[in-house]
Amino acid sequence: MLIRKAIDTDFTSIWTIFKTVIEPGDTYVFAPDTSREDAFSYWFGAGVTAYVAETAGQIVGMYKIVPNQRDLGSHVANASFMVDPNCHGQGIGKAMGIHCLQEAKRLGYLAIQFNFVVSTNHAAVALWQKLGFSIVGTLPKSFHHKTLGYVDAYVMYRFLDN
């Protein structure tokens, strides 16, 4: 697997994965009818550094890293990840997570904060915990899950010193 910085021409593949991931309404806050333009801005907007994971020349996942806050909070990163659902269970999320930890440290961040991890996304919660993240807060009934109704979301945090 190759993980590299995303370029504009990757967006067709990113868009396909993005639409597939958000359509079920069970892991991301994006509405299923999110526009292509909004998705492009999310992955390639000002201040965003995006990466793609490739297997056999095909994009199978992506993540982005940004400062979690501006100015005096900019030493903490925020990141967002998506894996092609057809490729789940192949270690792509874990590989991108490890890559992100290394990149965040290289970029000078002191920690990473995930602001909104849906509590019922058990695979994501377990992966981030395996990679050293802790749940530091619970946002009660803050996500409107398409099939389960209102569920909690977690704030997860990890220092980059180890």
Image (spheres, grey):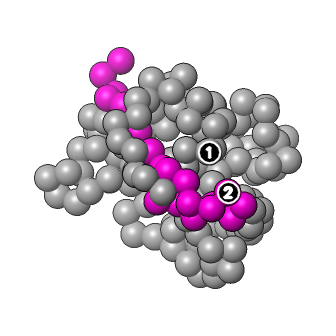
- As rendered, which of 64 and 130 lies closer to the eye? 130
Q: Is residue 124 left or right of residue 105?
A: right
Q: Which mark is residue 148?
A: 2
Q: Where is 94 relative to 19, above or below?
A: above
Q: Residues within 10 Å of mark 2 (few under 14, many from 20)?
A: few
Q: Which mark is residue 71?
A: none
Contact check, label 2 and label 1, Cβ < 8 Å:
yes
Q: Which residues are magenta?
A: 142-162
Q: Amino acid at mark 1?
A: Thr
Residue 10 sits in quarter: bottom right
Q: Main secondary structure of the magenta part?
A: strand
**Secondary structure under badge 1?**
loop
Q: Residue at x 74, y 44 (%)?
A: 54
Q: Outermost residue toward the top?
A: 162
Q: Residue at x 62, y 74 (%)?
A: 31
Q: Which mark is residue 120?
A: 1
Indicate which disc, 2 or 1, sits on the residue closer to the N terminus. Answer: 1
Query: From mark 2 to mark 1, how far is it between C-alphas?
Result: 9 Å
Residue 32 sits in quarter: bottom right
Q: Residue at x 63, y 44 (%)?
A: 121
Q: Is residue 135 left or right of residue 85?
A: left
